[in-house]
């Protein structure tokens, strides 16, 4: 019975509908993250310009949920022989994660201790997004033969 379930799961992961749904969730996550960061930047520069119309904390909750789903439904891990991240790449990823965490914490600090949890999760999602973008860029270059 266990092997049957494993076979059905593998078959489901190989279907075009599953792949389409996974791709949709990952694109939705990227779109929500970029939009959230842009709205947060606008709100930081011009006070009450976004918060008068939209509560960014709710947006962040949706972003975290979609991010977790995108990470859990992502491609299976396999050994990658592609380009490894250099020191410069790692520094960019760390700076982006820390900057994102600081901005999210600054905007959510009024909710108390939960702001620390949200900022750490957001930082992790930003780092995962950077890693995903670099990996897809490398795979796309290999696929196209460039």
Image: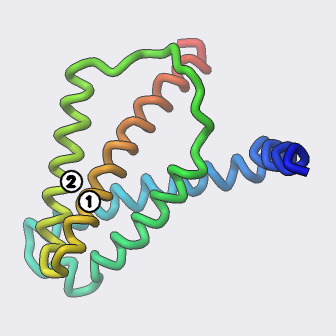
Numbered disc in front, either 1 or 2: 2
Of 34 and 126, which appears nearest the observer? Answer: 126
Distance from Cα at disc 1 to Cα at disc 2 = 8 Å
Query: Regarding mark 1 in the picture, which secondary structure is present there?
Result: helix
Could you say where residue 73 lies in the image, as x and y percent from the top left?
A: 60, 50
N-term-proximal mark, 1 vs 2: 1
Of 110 and 27, which appears nearest the observer? Answer: 110
* Position of 34 relative to 57 (above/below): above
Q: Residue furthest front?
A: 1
- Circle 1 residue: 37
Residue, x 54% and y 24% (percent of image)? Answer: 139
Q: Residue furthest bottom?
A: 52
Query: Regarding mark 2 in the picture, which secondary structure is present there?
Result: helix
Mark 2 neighbour density, 10 Å: few (under 14) some (14–19) many (20 or more): many
Residue 58: quarter of image: bottom left
Could you say where residue 57 lies in the image, as x and y percent from the top left?
A: 29, 77
Q: Is residue 68 left or right of residue 105?
A: right
Q: Is residue 88 left or right of residue 124?
A: left
Report how many numbered discs are placed on residues in the image.
2
Residue, x 53% and y 12% (percent of image)? Answer: 146
Could you say where residue 82 lies in the image, as x and y percent from the top left?
A: 48, 16
Q: Are marks 1 and 2 in contact (CB under 8 Å)?
A: yes
Colour mode?
Answer: rainbow
Q: Check residue 28 in the rendering and tell me which mark sits there, or answer none.
A: none
Residue, x 51% and y 14% (percent of image)? Answer: 81
Mark 1 neighbour density, 10 Å: few (under 14) some (14–19) many (20 or more): some
* Position of 35 relative to 71 (above/below): below
Residue, x 21% and y 71% (percent of image)? Answer: 115
Q: Check residue 100 in the rendering and tell me which mark sits there, or answer none.
A: 2
């Amino acid at each position: 019975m266990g092997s049957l379930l494993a076979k059905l799961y593998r078959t489901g992961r190989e279907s075009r509908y599953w792949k389409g749904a996974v791709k949709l969730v990952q694109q939705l996550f990227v779109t929500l993250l970029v939009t959230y960061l842009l709205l947060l930047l606008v709100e930081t520069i011009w006070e009450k310009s976004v918060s008068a119309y939209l509560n960014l904390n709710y947006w962040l909750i949706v972003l975290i949920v979609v991010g977790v789903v995108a990470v859990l439904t992502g491609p299976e891990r396999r050994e990658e022989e592609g380009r490894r991240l250099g020191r410069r790449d790692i520094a960019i990823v760390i700076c982006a994660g820390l900057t994102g965490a600081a901005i999210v914490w600054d905007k959510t600090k009024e909710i108390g201790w939960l702001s620390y949890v949200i900022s750490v999760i957001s930082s992790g999602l930003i780092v995962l997004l950077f890693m995903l973008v670099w990996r897809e860029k490398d795979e796309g270059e290999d696929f196209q033969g460039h």
